[in-house]
Amino acid sequence: MILTVTLNAALDITYHVDRLRPQGSNRVHTVAERAGGKGVNVSRVLHALGHRTVVTGLAGGAAGSALRRELATARLPEQLLLIDGESRRTVAVVDESAGDTTILLEPGPVVRPDEWERLLEHLDRLLQGAAAVVFSGSLPRGVPEDAYAQLVRLAAGHRVPAVLDADGAALRSALPAGPALIKPNADELAATTGLADPVAAAQALLAAGAEAVVASLGPDGLIAVTPQGSWQARPPERLAGNPTGAGDAAVAALTVGLVAGAAWPERLADAVALSAATVAAPLAGDFDLDVLRRLRPLVDVGPLSEPRSP
Ligand SMILES: Nc1ncnc2c1ncn2[C@@H]1O[C@H](COP(=O)(O)OP(=O)(O)OP(=O)(O)O)[C@@H](O)[C@H]1O
Ligand SMILES: [Mg+2]
């Protein structure tokens, strides 16, 4: 079972309007609600691929109840810990005439110290049945600054490999705890290290304690910097669609490869094909199976720096 932990789980609301008028009243003709947050997206992808997964993290209030109901409808097993605060909602307003989307993000609850302690105990139990754990997304207010360091150490105590998808201080503080894998995107890599070159930045994060670094570079694919070698993998084509959640799909594929002990080039090719298939599907956490099957054999994977010819 792959456990995903979303500390700031959300209820994602999508409003469709014919045309968005910023200073006026807007009639919404379709409303959709889904459980969201990066770990939830990872679990959705794992579940669709047929892997056993459990969603956990923190949820509370009416939005927390609604997101748990949606997970039940989607048959995604969840063990979210209930807190007193109200889970955040995100609102995406899709303007159908302009073909663009405006997004509003609530800050989410303030987590109390006793709720954080309960979460550590809760995870201590859930980690007993986990083959790997994925920690994804931003930290809610009130949790300790070194939250991810504490969680990665907790997983290490159970010998469960930890995959971390975070950025900035939350990521930096967790590196000495030795996560098995981190997956920053290009902006997160630059913001976390202050280095413009992705390879140099990935090497710096490896030196700071991550056991492996896979950086996602949007349509350019992935680079991996690991003690076993460095590779890059590119999608055979640039897809049009919704790139939100493509990184979460990459995390899902990389975690499956980690649990299986697959060779790095294979893990990267799987991640590139699956994340491209996610771009081709309209909602984060969904993917297009035909695109996955078509692209997987066409992904180009090779060593990051070719040996120079004499
Ligand atoms: N337009 C695209 N066409 C094909 N593949 C893409 C495209 N955009 C992204 N990808 C694939 O998705 C992977 C992840 O994308 P990206 O680097 O944007 O992740 P991210 O910013 O972490 O996304 P998120 O956090 O929203 O899930 C890339 O490494 C690449 O393989
Ligand atoms: Mg991401």
Image: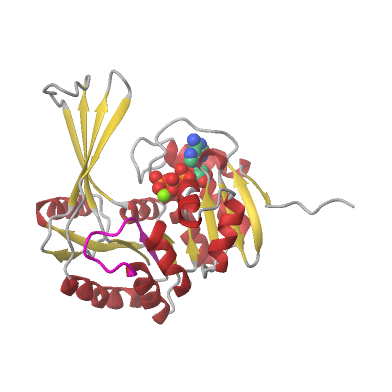
Please check the rendered image and state whether residue 149 is part of the magenta-colored stretch, yes or no: no
Q: Where residue 231 sits in the image (x, y, percent)?
A: 64, 54
Q: Which residues are magenta?
A: 133-146
The residue shown at (34%, 69%) is 146
Quadrant of residue 174 in the image?
bottom left
Of the pair 263 and 16, the residue shown nearer to us: 16
Q: Position of residue 100 (x, y in %)?
A: 32, 26
Residue 128 seen in the current view = yes
Image quadrant in which the N terminus is located: bottom left
* Residue situated furthest front in the rendering: 194
Residue 274 can be seen in this image: no
Q: Locate residue 97, reporting x and y percent.
A: 28, 18
Question: Is residue 127 placed above or below 199 in the rendered structure?
Answer: below
Residue 143 quadrant: bottom left
- Residue closer to the observer: 276 or 61: 61
Which residue sits at x=17%, y=57%? 109
Residue 33 located left or right of residue 198: left
Tell me: residue 148, above or below residue 284: below
Taking depth in this image into account, of 288 and 132 the one nearest to the observer is: 132
Rendered residue at 25%/50% (across/down): 74
